[in-house]
Image (spheres, rainbow, N blue to C red):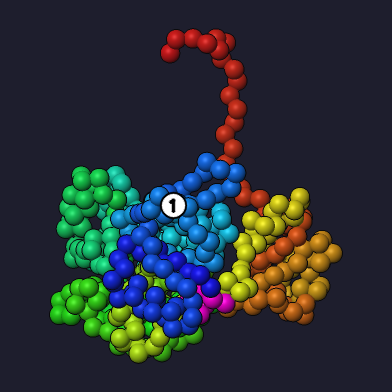
Amino acid sequence: MKLAILSRAPKAYSTQRLRTAALDRGHDVKVLNTLRFAIDLSGPEPDLQFRGRTLSDYDAILPRVGASVTYFGTAVVRQFEQMDVYTPNTANGISNSRDKLRATQILSRHQIGMPATTFVRNRADVLPAIERVGGAPVVIKLLEGTQGIGVILAPDSKVAEAIIETLHSTSQNVLIQSFVKESKGRDIRALVVGDRVVAAMRRTAQGDEFRSNVHRGGTVEPVTLEPAFEQAAVRSAQIMGLRVAGVDMLEGADGPLVMEVNSSPGLEGIEAATKLDVAGAIIDYIGNQVAFPEIDVRQRLTVSTGYGVAELVVHGSADLVGKTIAESGLEDRDITVLTLHRGTTVIPNPRRRTALEPQDRLLCFGKLEEMRSMIPERRRRRDKVRKLPKEPIHEP
């Protein structure tokens, strides 16, 4: 395949390893500076220029978009997507993962375990927010910090309030998170490629430092993940729209707690710790996808009038509980179950004899009207409509 690695750091370890792995496998690969592209929307079809010339055809790209150029970098990736060039990480996925608040909001919708988190702006809301996450000590995070920068541990509520007030005064947005004491300055980085974890390491902070990032002096060791951690990592990456990602997790008392999903994970630390060819696994995955690419099912199928993809939740009081898929009546309503999500377990193409349980989530394709009728209406408080004033237009 012909592959472009989008990177502003051609001599960085990760870029060099990916380039070498691609060349070793016989691929045609180039490292292209993300900022030297120009998006061309003047012609009949979407196009790109590079260094002032029309870009040649590529089978795939591998984005390594830095935080400082997220907006332009994702615009370039989006243009490649419009040109039907394969990318393991979509522009939307990169944007979602780069904003810690947006990422937390998306993951919380899918029952991913995370440290208790709040986001406030008004000073009067800070102390109640700290109490909601379990009280001090708390972790304060800048929304767009990387490599442990912008992550502060506040030992008590007053210190936390002062730090947050100072950051707000400089127009910084921050998250307030509970401090997971049982993690003891350790976390796990899982490198997800496609639908599996190809390598994982445990990072341990040094001395009194609570941040375990390698850039902060943390030490690393290889680790074999328990199934719950592997499933949490893969699901988190896929929910974000990323097929290559570094997922950082804390070892909570009740299981994995996802902290962050990184769309451009560094490879040096994890390859050194595990002695595994992570770069090669990434290149192999991209090569397989170019040969047999995944498609955005929702985008492709919603153009079929009246049909689309939707997620149905089996509620405890629903008629579906205890019935098999064959008995559920879904097929009679022209609804096909593509995937069943049960807790952290994913069952692709479930058998017709599979019995449904409360809180199962069914990814279905079928008639949108039929699927809408199966979603219980949300109760909303409705304000009474007031009578029209005697003088509809008047001075206040």
Question: In the image, residue 376 lies at what x, y percent?
Answer: 67, 54
Is residue 166 within the magenta segment? no
The range drawn in magenta is: 283-288
Relative horizontal placement of residue 298, taking residue 155 as reference (left or right): right
Question: In the image, residue 310 lies at what x, y percent?
Answer: 66, 59
**Residue drawn at the location 49% of the way across and 9% of the way down:** 394
Which picture quadrant has residue 348?
Answer: bottom right
The majority secondary structure of the magenta stretch comes to helix
99 and 169: which is toward the camera: 99
**Residue drawn at the location 31% of the way across and 46% of the way down:** 121
167 relative to 138, above or below: above
75 relative to 287, above or below: above
Question: In the image, residue 330 lies at what x, y percent?
Answer: 79, 65
Relative horizontal placement of residue 369, taking residue 108 as reference (left or right): right
Q: Which residue is mark 1?
A: 53
**Residue drawn at the location 33% of the way across and 82% of the way down:** 270
52 and 98: which is toward the camera: 52
